[in-house]
């Protein structure tokens, strides 16, 4: 009797386990794509810096709060933001912008070296640069009007006992075309925008250090 009861219990349990195995979905491959901000072309000077150029420090690069997400942000309409979880930045956006700005500054003819935080103790600097990114996103506004949009505020501050802001930039990059779907194209457009910001910073630098 005990054997028959055990078998009666085990048989339904076996059927339940087999059924559970059949309803578990198969593993799905990861379709997430990652993108980097990158220089449109290799630096002409190889990023070595000018022998007697200015010494700069990138003190900070801050991005707007809504950009603190690994997903690439797209604006649809005036107040709607959307993000695709499968199209992401390969690094934090502020770090990518800082890296690309430094890459372009080092290649400028009037710049000797560019330091980033944390600054070394022996790293004397002529000017410090702070960047606040206001917008860095794609914009969908119609079938033929999709673009990228980038804007930022920049302060260039002198060093020494009496530091002061020597230049303030309100930079708005020209919108670049985007098809509304190709995130590699969007990343390339935003890369060009950050490169344009770096060029604007170089143009705003004083010719000599100001104490």
Image (cartoon, helix red, strand yellow):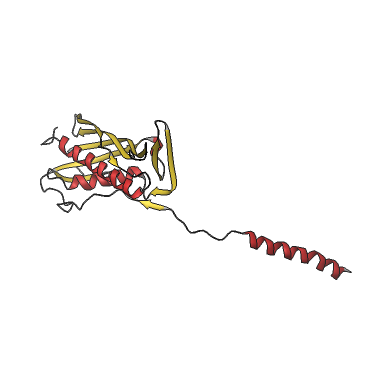
Label total for image: 0
Residue 2 figure quarter: bottom right
Quarter-of-image position of residue 207: top left
- Give residue 44's position: percent from left, percent from top: 15, 52
In the rendered view, tell whether residue 22 sits above or below residue 196.
below
Residue 162 in the image: state x and y as whole percent. Answer: 19, 29
Query: In which quadrant is the C terminus drawn?
Result: top left
Given residues 55 and 135, the one toward you in this image is 135
Residue 142 seen anywhere in this rendered image of the structure = yes
Image position of 9 (left or right of 133): right
Q: Nearer the viewer, residue 182 or 18?
A: 182
Q: Residue at x 64, y 62 (%)?
A: 22
> Given the current orientation, which residue lies at the most extreme right position?
1
Residue 142 as seen in the image, left or right of residue 6? left
Quadrant showing the N terminus: bottom right
Q: Is residue 118 visible?
A: no
Q: Residue drawn 34% across and 37% down?
A: 63
Whole-percent x, y for residue 79 in the image = 42, 31
In front of the other: 91 or 146: 146
In percent of width and height, residue 122 lies at: 21, 45
Q: Residue furthest front?
A: 143
161 or 203, nearer to the observer = 203
């Amino acid at each position: 009797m005990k054997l028959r009861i055990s078998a009666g219990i085990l048989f339904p349990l076996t059927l339940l386990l087999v059924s559970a195995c059949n309803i578990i979905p198969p593993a799905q491959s990861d379709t997430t794509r990652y993108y980097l901000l990158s220089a449109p072309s290799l630096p002409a000077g190889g990023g070595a810096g000018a022998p007697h150029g200015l010494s700069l420090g990138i003190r900070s690069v801050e991005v707007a709060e809504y950009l603190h997400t690994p997903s690439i942000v797209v604006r649809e309409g005036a107040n709607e933001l959307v993000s695709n979880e499968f199209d992401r930045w390969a690094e934090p956006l502020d770090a990518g912008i800082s890296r690309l700005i430094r890459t372009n500054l080092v290649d400028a003819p009037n710049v000797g070296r560019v330091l980033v935080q944390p600054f070394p103790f022996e790293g004397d600097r002529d000017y410090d640069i702070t960047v606040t990114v206001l917008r860095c996103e794609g914009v969908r506004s119609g079938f033929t009007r999709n673009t990228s949009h980038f804007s930022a505020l920049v302060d260039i501050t002198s060093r020494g006992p009496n530091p002061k802001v020597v230049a303030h930039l309100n930079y708005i990059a020209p919108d670049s075309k985007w098809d509304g779907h190709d995130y590699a194209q969007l990343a390339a457009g935003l890369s060009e925008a950050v490169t344009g910001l770096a060029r604007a910073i170089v143009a705003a630098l004083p010719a000599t250090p100001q104490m």
